[in-house]
Image (cartoon, rainbow, N blue to C red):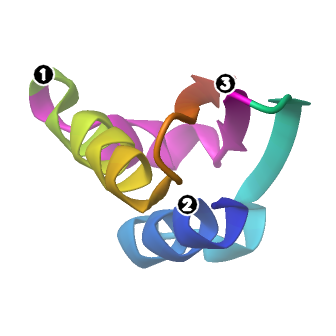
Amino acid sequence: MEKLVEYVAKALVDHPENVVVEVTHDSENEMEIALRVDPEDRGRVIGKNGRTAHAIRTLLAAAAPQGRAVMLEIVD
C-alpha cells in the first residue's frame, strides 16, 4: 500500500525527492498512511476540491484486502 501511494504521489509532484510515505498505524482491520510532500506540491496532491486525494483514497480502498480499511492522511 505504501508503494502505491508513493508511486502515485511521485508522479503528481514537481519535487518527487521530497515525498515521504509512512505507515502510522497498522492493525488487523485498519491501516493509516501518512503522506508528506514538499509544501509547494501539497495542492497538486490534494487537487481541486480534494478530488485528487479522494481518487488516491479510492485506489487504496480498491487495493486493500477485503475487510481492511486504509486511511490516507496528507500531513504538513
Can you tell which quarter of the image residue 17 is in? bottom right
The residue that label 1 is drawn on is 49
The residue that label 3 is drawn on is 75
Q: Assess disc 1: are there few (<14), some (14-19) or many (≥20) residues with their C-alpha within 10 Å of its C-alpha.
A: few
> Residue 58 has which mark?
none
Amino acid carrying label 3: it is: Val
> Residue 5 has which mark?
2
The boundaries of the magenta stretch are 29-48
In this rendering, position of residue 63 left or right of residue 26: left
Residue at 62%, 67% in the rendered image: 6
Viewer-nearest of discs 3 and 2: 2
> CB of mark 1 within 8 Å of CB of mark 2?
no
Question: Distance of mark 1 from mark 2, alpha carbons?
Answer: 19 Å
Residue at 54%, 76% in the rendered image: 7
Amino acid carrying label 2: it is: Val
Question: Distance of mark 3 from mark 1, alpha carbons?
Answer: 17 Å
Residue 62's spot in the image, x, y percent?
32, 54
Q: Earlier in the sequence, mark 3 or mark 1?
A: 1
Q: Check the picture and name the quadrant holding the C terminus.
A: top right
Residue nearest the viewer, comparing 53 with 57: 57
